[in-house]
Image: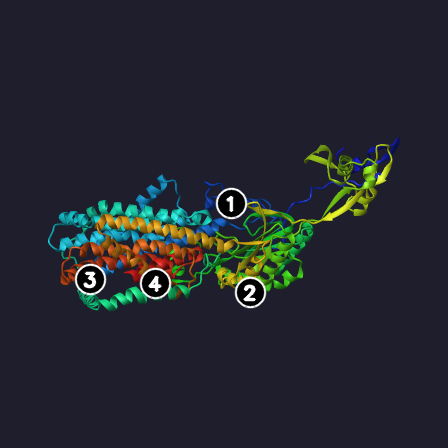
Amino acid sequence: KKQEQAILETLLKVDGKRIWLRDVATVEKHYRKSNTLASFNSEKTLTINVAKTENGNSIELAKTIKEEVQKLQEKYPDITAGTFSDISAFIKNRLNTVISNIMFGLVLVGFVMYLLVNKRISFVVVLGIPTSFVISLIFLDFGGYSINMMSLLGALIAIGVIVDDAIIVAENIQRHIEEGLSPKEASIKGTKEVIAPVLTASLTTIFAFLPMLLMTGEMGEFIKLIPIAITVLIVASIIESFIFLPMHSRHFLKAKEKEVDWSRVTRAYKKVIRWLIHKRKTTIFTFWVVVPLLTVGAFYMTDFKIFPAFDGDQMNVSGKLPVDTTLEETYKVATELEEQILDFKEEYSIESITTISGFRVDTQGRGENGSHLFHLFIDLKKAKPDNFVSKYITPYLSFDYEKEGREREKKSFLIEKELRERLKSFEQKYDFENFEVKGARAGVVNMPIEIFVESDNKQAVDIAINKIRKSLESIPGATSIGDDAKLGVAELKLKINQYGESLGVSETALVGALGSYFLESTQSKSFDKEGVVEIVIQEKRRDLLETLKQFPITLDDKREVALKDVVEFVQIQSYEKITKQDGKRRKMVFADVESDATATEILAKLEPVIEELQSNSEIEIVFGGEKEKNQQLAQEMALASVIALFFIFITLLVMFDSLRYSFIVLSVVPLSLFGALAGHIAMGLDLSMPSIIGALGLAGVVINDGIIMLDFLRKTKTVNELLERAKLRLRPIVLTSITTLAGLATLIFFPSGQAVVLQPLAVSLGFGLFWGT
């Protein structure tokens, strides 16, 4: 039978008697309970999640989906259809930012060359940049790499670096043309003359960045495309500088071309160098005592966080209620929170809020299901342009810029802080086991603070976790504090007592009797016009404890006895989940960090509590989060630095055939670190992982000038001869440094969106190179 009324008219035969089903049961037809309930801007909704495959194109996929959604809206005007959490919009914004920065960097480099040399050299050098990009794209394609955010950011960093080779070659060719050689002869001689120093300088830059590929884990995955992109671009620039540039120079460079007069600068430079040589004790004291002391002082003036905060377009609010909370109860709490946040819709430029009950993204970044969980995806409107580049450059130099909808004035990390403060009363209203307000993060750590307590003593673990949590709650800057030592649903274990054993009651008999009654099971299946219909029988009183206690157990001799008389009821409550590491049970306390604080500062204030807990031999404290990543970063960057310096040293040794000259060039590396640190202080930035990577790359960039200079100086016999030859190298060295700085300028001074993550890298390179020059 298919319909409820027809099923109720079923005639049953029980113990020889006939009865109607309607006399002993009710019949309901409905869908099974949902695992999740959703709402969109306080309206009940059904949601579909779409993810791309590895080879998919997010932007094209999103475009197609939006077209289909629009058709759906037109077909069914009575419903509202829309999209949320569109990752492709974030990708498009990032691409626009990076591409416009690259284009503007190219313009700056060409303009600087035009101002400081002449228009013909400027044209020849800038002409080589697109050539280098085309060659590098061919290499990347053969290597199986795609154009993405990280490879484009690598290109942005490398813009100024890749023109260095071209500047040195073009400037040297022009010098020989001015001395009377024909353009053809000058192109050949000028190129051959600088092959060794240019090749060496390029190799040292490659060797500085390439060891970053040794970094492992999420950090390694995050950063690996930057050294690959930079390496490929430098190789491409070498090919362009030695093959294509001499051919361009032959046709475009001419004698007596009007150019900027550097004579006053070179005369002043000679005087400074002469004075430094004359005052050698003062010079040595300054560079080997004062500068190292300033470097150490600058290092202690800066804080460290693994990544800087940046402005994103999405916020996340998630909650975890007691484990026995029903889905409907969770949905009620979540939608109340949704309505409260919608009160700030205009103030925080909120585009939409999508609420999912029965699901959330946990602290490890994984999807977690449960009736007591909820997650709010808050889409913010696009940010207003907030600097010179985003206002006047990005709209005109990017490929697919959308001016509409750019209304938000507040940064997402400020909204996050204010919203967290405003929701404190809501958090206190309900018995949350965990409540998080979280903005955009660079994803190599899920929570900046993760403290693991390892022990087989459950009581010791609980005491330790409570102490750590209470201490964290008293430290300013620590927020979204929680742990995974939560108890799960209470369980009843049935243990057959002595009386039950004497009656012959077995565990097998109990399982058979109780399972068919208390566990929901499909008894039969039917079909109707909508498809398969399952017939499920449930006892109305099955969820009452008293029903379980009075449940009749049939003995072998057909007698019946109440369950409570033959078993002992043992109530237990275990942890919601059990985690082990290397065979040891571990529980975690975690906390987020506000944008104006660092995990290092908070952990330093927590140290007395940690030391007290570690004095207990029963437990062991292990750190995850930023502290673990920082230790990993320090070890891997130390190894990368040693490998980089070794290969740079071998390259210098091959070129100069002298240990002394090689060490002279390498001496610039430690001295240049002061510039990188001073740059962070001047820009008001904390040190971060990108800062360290930039400092490692700096080693290869700053010694390029030293290689070009020392290659001209090593054959001199007198101070006057040394000064004359040093003067000849001043212009190309200053030009290469200025063009590198021009290429990095937009990332240093005008970062926006996710590009802020790599601003410290550019600051390390830019300010370090400025001081190193």
Give the mark, 4 or 3, whose residue is nearer the N terminus: 3
Mark 4 crowdedness (10 Å alpha carbons): few <14, some 14-19, many ≥20:
many
| N-terminal-most mark, 1 or 3 | 1
Residue 471, image x and y in percent? 58, 63
Label 3: element kind: loop
**4 and 3 marks in contact (CB < 8 Å):** no
Q: Secondary structure at mark 1?
A: helix
Q: Nearer the viewer, mark 1 or mark 3?
A: 3
* Element type at mark 4: helix
> Which of the two discs, 3 and 2, labels the residue nearer the N terminus?
3
Camera-side mark, 1 or 4: 4
Spatial separation of the CA atoms under disc 1 and disc 3: 57 Å
Classify the position of the C terminus by image quarter: bottom left
Q: Quadrant of the N terminus?
A: top right
| Residue 456 percent location from the top left of the image | 62, 49
The answer to which of 292 and 241 lies nearer the viewer is 292
Q: Is residue 655 left or right of residue 179?
A: right
> Of the residues under marks 1 and 4, which one precedes in the sequence?
1
Q: CA distance from mark 4 to mark 2?
A: 33 Å
User: Residue 674 has which mark?
Assistant: 4
Q: Which residue is mark 3?
A: 260
Q: Which residue is mark 2?
A: 475
Would you identify the image quadrant in which residue 730 lies? bottom left
* Residue denoted by label 1: 67
Q: Secondary structure at mark 2?
A: loop
Q: Is residue 136 visible?
A: yes
In contact (CB < 8 Å): disc 1 and disc 3: no
Label 1 environment density (alpha carbons within 10 Å; few <14, some 14–19, many ≥20): few
Q: Identity of the amino acid at label 4?
A: Phe
Position of 562 with respect to 286 (left or right) is: right
* Nearer to us in this view, 61 or 150: 150
How far is disc 4 from disc 3 in space, using C-alphas? 32 Å
